[in-house]
Image (cartoon, rainbow, N blue to C red):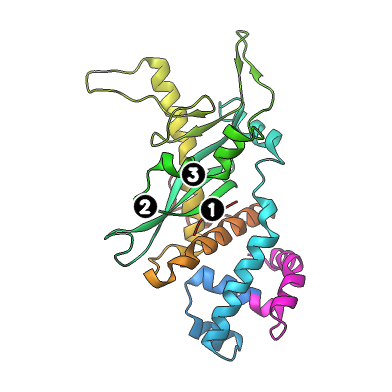
Amino acid sequence: MSQQTFTHLLHTLFPALSSSLPSFPPDSALAATLFRLSHDASYRSLARRFGFPSSADACRIFYTVCKAINDKLGNLVEFRENLERIVVGFGWISLPNCCGVLGFGKFNVNGELLGRNGSLLVQALVDSEGRFLDISAGWPCPMKPESILYQTKLFIGVEESRELLNGPAYELGDGNFIPQYILGDSCFPLMPWLITPYVRNNEEDSFSSAEKEFNIVHSRAMGLVDTAFARVKSRWQLLGRRWKEECIEFLPSVIVTGCLLHNFLIKFSEPMPDDDLGCLKGGVYDF
């Protein structure tokens, strides 16, 4: 993160940090939080590096700053406000009137609470540039994807309140119209507004050339979700390791923090981790 971008972030958070942490300089509190997120640093090392009185103070500072980020940067989850830009972006990759790609990220947790290979699931909608447009974090891994979907604000906004995906249809050259829609992985149910890939009901079935071509475009788009989460974990190494079971209640909010900072850095044109490394391929918090 450049000094200029850090200054912008500090300016955004300064009032909240000044009132919540009156005994600590806001710039030190923010720098310590970003350092822990980036390097998976312990509270003890934060206290020593940034001059905090104790590890307990470092812990309190970290979660206070995360809360401030979630409160003040929530507007960067911008599905409703920038739908025209989102649709135009997907049009450039042969997905006319697409409003996002919906998938899941997994964040690992140690212990027996969620099973041997336990994890928390995060349902996320992303745009063609890898921004998070909707985040719902903290679902236990045994839950079925459709069960998660039905409980999220995204689903309610489309199916119940009808506030989302109600924009104009796109007219094709043959006179047919495509309403606004979202692409979803095969784990989701097929709906009029949630388009999943073609699947074979049995081994003998084969895809037509049009179905194969659609699945190729669909798969390429689904990679946007994987890449977005990979970038979050690469930049914020704290989210790439296994969390202790006793800390699981805090993990969803920290995941949201990482995703919001990801959007913030895109907004200020900061390079993504794979731009530097070349190594990437393709409680519930509901934002």
Residue assigned mark 1 = 275
Report the magenta residues as a range: 1-29
Which numbered marker is on residue 141? Answer: 2
Q: Residue furthest bottom?
A: 53
Q: Are marks 3 and 2 in contact (CB under 8 Å)?
A: no
In the rendered view, would you say 47 is above or below 207? below
Q: Position of residue 154 (x, y in %)?
A: 57, 41
Circle 3 SS class? helix
Q: Position of residue 260 (x, y in %)?
A: 61, 56
Residue assigned mark 3 = 225
Sequence-first tag of 1 and 3 = 3
Q: Residue furthest top?
A: 174
Which of the 4 quarters of the picture holds residue 268? bottom right
Q: Position of residue 62 (x, y in %)?
A: 58, 75
Amino acid beneath label 2:
Cys
Q: Nearest to the eye among marks 1 and 3: give it.
A: 3
| Separation of residues labelled 1 and 2 (CA atoms) | 31 Å
- Residue at 39 percent across and 21 percent down: it is 212
Of residues 205 and 60, which is closer to you in this image? 60
| Separation of residues labelled 1 and 3 (CA atoms) | 17 Å
Tell me if I can see residue 123 in this picture: yes
Circle 2 SS class? loop
